[in-house]
Structure formats: C-alpha cells, structure tokens
Image (cartoon, helix red, strand yellow):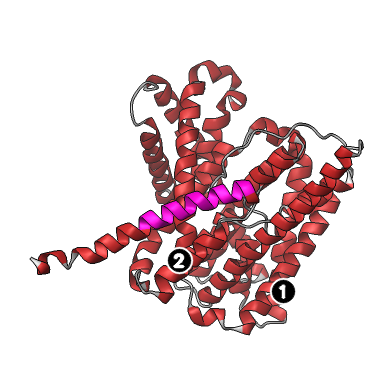
Amino acid sequence: MKRMHRPMIPVLLAFAAVAAIIFIGFFANMLLKRAGIPEVFFLVIVGVLLGPISGLFPESMVRALLPYFSQFTLAMILFNVGLELDMSSLLKEGPRTVARTVIYVFLSISIILFLFTHFLGWPLYQSLLLGSIIGGETTMTVVPYVARELSSRKVYASLSVEAALNSAILIIVFTTVLSSFRAAIPLTMSTVSTIASGFFSQLSIGIVIGIVSAAIWVKLVRIFSGADYLYIATIGFMLVTYVVASVVGGSGVIAVLTLAFTMSNIRLIADPLAIYLSIPPDVKQYITNFQDEISFFLRTFFYVFLGLVLEIRSFLSPEIYVMSLMTLGVLILARFVATWTANAPESRDDKVFVFTMMAQGLTPAVLATTLLQYNVPMSQEIVMIVTFIIIFTNIITVVGARRQVSRLLGRLSSGGGPSGAQPPPEERRDGAA
C-alpha cells in the first residue's frame, strides 16, 4: 500500500504549490489595489523558491512547458489588448498618445542598441532583442490603484491606450527581429529592406485574416448568444485564427490582435453593418469578464514561471546589476523625452504623472522567456535584466505616482486643483498587458 501512495506525493505537492500560487496572486492583487505594492515582487520570489532553490519544479520540466505556455500567453495578451483598445478613445487621445508611444519605444530601442553593441560588446541581434522586449511601458498594473486616489479621466484613458499600443508594438517588433535571427539574416543595410518586406507581408496577411475572422465570429456570436460556454468557444476560435494566419504566412499575433480589436469596435468600424455584426452588450460584457479572470490566472502563473527559469548564479553577478541599472537609466531618459515632447501643452502635474507611469509587466516577461524556448545565445542574461527592469520600473511607478497623488491632493485641499481634474474613473481590473 505504501508503494501505491508514494507516486502521489509529487502530485500532491504540485497541487499544493498551484493552490499557494493562486492564493498568493489573489492576496497580492488585493495588496496592489490597497497599498500599491506590485504583485510581481511576490510572484517572482515564489517562482525562485519553487524552482532554482527547492527544485520542486525541475528546469527540464519548465522548459518542456515553455513553448506551449509562452505562445498561448502571448496570444492571450494580444487578445486582451484588442478587447481593451477602444476606438473612440484611440481617436480622441490618439495623436499625443501615439506620438508619446512611438517616441518612447523607438528611442529606448535605439539607445539600448547603441550602448550594448558599442560599449558592452553585445551582438547586434541580442541588443536589438533586449531593446524590443523592454523598450516601452507595457502594463496597467498600478493604474487602477492610482486612479482610485486621483486622476483625470483624460490621463487615465491616455495611459490605457498607451499600454495597449506599447504591448502591440513591442510584440510586433520582437517577433520580426526574432524571426530574422532564426533565419540567420545578417543585420545590414542591404537586408533591412528584405526584413521590412517580410514584416509588412506578415502584417497585412494577419490584419486581413483578423478582420475576416472577426466578421465571421461576431455573426456566429449573435446567432448563439444564448449558448453556454461562449467564452471558451471564443478562445477556441481565437486559436484557430492564430493557426490559420501562421500557416498561410501571416502573423498569428497580429491576426489575434485584429480579431479582438474588430470584435470590440465593429460597431464603429462597420457602421452600416452594425445592426448585423455588432455583439450584444450582455455577451460582450460576459466575454470581457471571463477574459479578466483568465488574464489574472495567466499573469499570476507567468510571473511565477519567470522566477522558475532564473539562475541563482545570475543574482550574484555584478555585471547583471550594472546592465540593468544602465538600461533603467535609458528608459527613464526616453520616458522623459517622450512625455515632455508629446504632452508639451499639458500641465506639469499631468506630465509628471504620465512620466511616472513606466512600469513593465507581463509582455516583457513572456517575450524574454521566449528566447529560452529557441535557445538564443545570452538569453539567460536578457531574462535576468528584464526581471530586474520589471521590478525597478514598478517601484518607480508606485513611488512616483504616490508622491504625485499626495501633491495633487494637497493642491485640491488648498483650493487650487489641477487643470481638468475630474472624478476618478471606475476601477478596472488589470489587463494582461
């Protein structure tokens, strides 16, 4: 009898670990909303304890799961981004937000590429991959907490659009660079046009398939709006869209992003067909609610997953800390330039508030671990730098935003509120981005 029960011990330990992760993620999220302490701190530490330190989850098992978990999470991130990206907000906040996003992303990537290749001797592709992973603000993790304290709807909407655009741009740039690296295409002036041509080809095919898929699925959703398990069916259709786009030579992630964005905004995109294609409001809310739950689950486990793939020796490497701090300085500089350039007409308080919103989140964690999947040289160093950047930028966002909130509240109590201040928006759950 004892022999029959022994094989169950690892299973029971795994179940206990999964339960602990879920509860830690749940209470960490509550702590985030109440005290503004990002959950990533606790979850990465849990991953390090369960993997490199205790060995409960061996590296071989983690790497076997990596291709499936990372690609599914990447698809879900883009699906969530598409659902969250509201066309009316995009059109209203578009010019400044798009300008700030583009300046921040490409200035960060350019400076990181220059510094790491010329001063640290990194290969060109590895430097470009690092820049495309962390070259932007990609999370709305702390915004619900800050917004509940004090923030105008205008600033909140702008940050929401920026987070969605940033995640989409970084994923597109990263997948393009990684594809070129795997194809062994040298990065020279003569090959840039080839890479760009392939990029726009994949982009256009992905967009077309995403739009067509959205039109088909929205029509089916209207027909089966009262059916059970509609959200699961939607996820299944999303995966079909991803596969079809990839098989025919398009970008699966772009197809998923376009699918979700078109589904969410089809009333505005195809107004003459809205009566036939728009999703009923109750069904849309149903899908959004389930997406929030799935986003929490994926976010929680992938932060733990990030801790599982870290190497203890990397924590003892001074070079990793130096490179992480240097990268952080680049991001701060790029964020300052982007904010003060794109938001020049706005008040100083609004600019400072937007400047502090530079926290990194799930997107860079997924992209960094994807390098391990393809055994990219120096991938472990990139994963460590990305982990520290996620932690450092979350600290900056929380500390900076809390100081700015206290300052604005002081102005309000003295009778001189910030320009355009309005009641804070309703709290919304953190997206996957």
Secondary structure under the numbered disc 2 in the rendered image = helix
In this rendering, which labeled residue sits more in front, label 1 or label 2? 2
Residue 204, given in percent of the width and then of the height, sits at: 55, 45
Q: Main secondary structure of the magenta part?
A: helix
Residue contact at pointers 1 and 2, CB within 8 angstroms: no
Q: Name the image quarter holding residue 421.
A: top right
Q: Nearer the viewer, residue 255 or 96?
A: 96
Secondary structure under the numbered disc 1 in the rendered image = helix
Q: Is residue 56 above or below residue 356?
A: below
The magenta-colored residue range is: 18-34
Q: Is residue 93 left or right of residue 299?
A: right
Read off the residue under disc 1: 326
Sequence-wise, which precedes: disc 1 or disc 2?
A: 2
Amino acid type assigned to the residue bearing label 2 in the image:
Gly
**Within 10 angstroms of label 2, few (less than 14), some, or many (20 or more) residues?**
many
Which circle marks residue 71 in the picture? none
